Each structure stands twice: as structure tokens, then as C-alpha cells.
Image (spheres, rainbow, N blue to C red):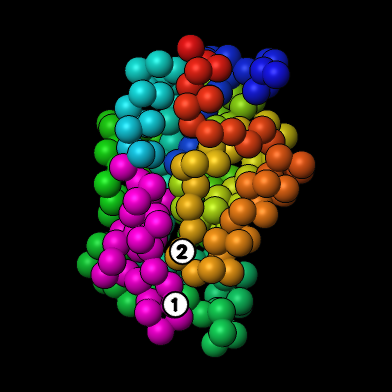
Amino acid sequence: MKIHSGMNKDNTALIVIDPINSCAHEKCETPDWNIHFSKIRKMLPKLNNFLKQYRKQVGGLVVVTTITPWTKEYLADNLNELYKDPGAEYYSEDTTGFDEQFYTVEVQKSDLVIAKNTYDVFTNKKLLEELQGRGVKYIVIAGIFSDGCVLASVIGGFSHGYNFVILKDLIETTDQDERQQLQKLLIDVTFPKMYGRTVDSDSFLAEMS
């Protein structure tokens, strides 16, 4: 079965969510909360290789997201409200810009880089204008965290009317068992049943060749 019958190189964009230090680098792990990123670091070289192949084979718009400083001054109001709960608070103490720098993934000048201050990239007006201006109808998505910003962006983009392809081997979350189990449910059930075609990256490239 074709991934999406109406999908072609001209109406498709790739969005890569947060391949950045704060979501991948060992220095940004939080052992006290059992937050470790070894599975993410293992996935990112494969994602980078896919990006190179995608640019060659498919072309078109590639969007790569980073974050604003993850501090009270920059974040969306509802995140600041959520973070009043000590059990949910996840502000960064970094003031050097290290958190926002890309990790492993090689961003090109032709890529559209979006800095977001919340989980869902589709809250960004610049992104929406770019997608609309190019006539994009289909979004291919990869990145970090599968159960966080990837999930929020899939839901947000779907609500804006976009059709999705989720690259199941190029999304990842923390090493924590509970989050790995949740990721499996998202890949096996939630994403394919509710939001879009959920395929591995090799199958996608074969389809688009």
C-alpha cells in the first residue's frame, strides 16, 4: 500500500524535532530523575544519514527545530503555569546557549531552523506561513522526544490539517523503561491508528524513489 496516494516531492516537508544538546548530550542528563539519553545518541547518527539521503533523493523543505532558552522568560505561559508543580518543573539552568546547539545532526544553510518555546512546533507562525506558501500537505516527522515534542507536534500539525508520515526508527525518547513502553504504544497503536502512516525510514525512501 502506498504511504499516501497524493504525496509527492513538491507537497511534502520533513520536520526534525530537537536534535539538540538538551535532549541528547550526556551533560544534559538528569540522573536524579532517571533521565538518560543513550538510546537517543544511538539513533541520531542514523537520523543524520537519513537527512543526507532525503536531501539528495527527495529535496524540498527540511525543517529542523531547536528551542529558545528553556527558562521562564522565554517559555509559553501555559508551560510556566505547569512548571509551578515541582513534579513537572523542567527549567534549564544553562545560560551559554549550549542546550540549544545541534547534536550530531548536520544542519544545512537551506534548512529552515525554527526555535520553539513550547512542545508543539506548529504553534510557530513562521513555520505555518512557510508550509502554506509552499503548498505543503504532507509532513514527514522524526526526532526527539517521541512522547514529548514529537507527539505534541504530530497532534498540533494534524489539527492544522496536515497529513503525517512518522518515521518510527528515527524517533526516540529517554532510556527510562516507562517512557520506552509508552513510545512502543505510540508507534504500534496511537500514531498509526489516529495520526498518520508509521513506517521505517528505509521504506519511506524506497516509496519516494
What amino acid does circle 2 point to? Thr
Q: Position of residue 107 (x, y in %)?
A: 30, 37
Judged left or right of residue 92, residue 180 is: right
Q: Residue lying at the far top in this picture: please name it.
A: 209
Q: Is residue 71 visible?
A: no
Region rendered in magenta = 18-45
Q: Are there few (<14), some (14-19), or many (20+) residues within 10 Å of tag 2? A: many
Q: How many marks?
A: 2
Depth check: give the residue in front, 203 or 91: 203
Q: Are there few (<14), some (14-19), or many (20+) residues within 10 Å of tag 1? A: few
* In contact (CB < 8 Å): disc 1 and disc 2: yes
Q: Residue lying at the far right in this picture: please name it.
A: 193
What amino acid does circle 1 point to? Asn
Q: Earlier in the sequence, mark 1 or mark 2?
A: 1
Residue at left offset 33%, top offset 77%: 93
Which residue was labeled with disc 2?
Answer: 174
Residue at left offset 32%, top offset 27%: 52
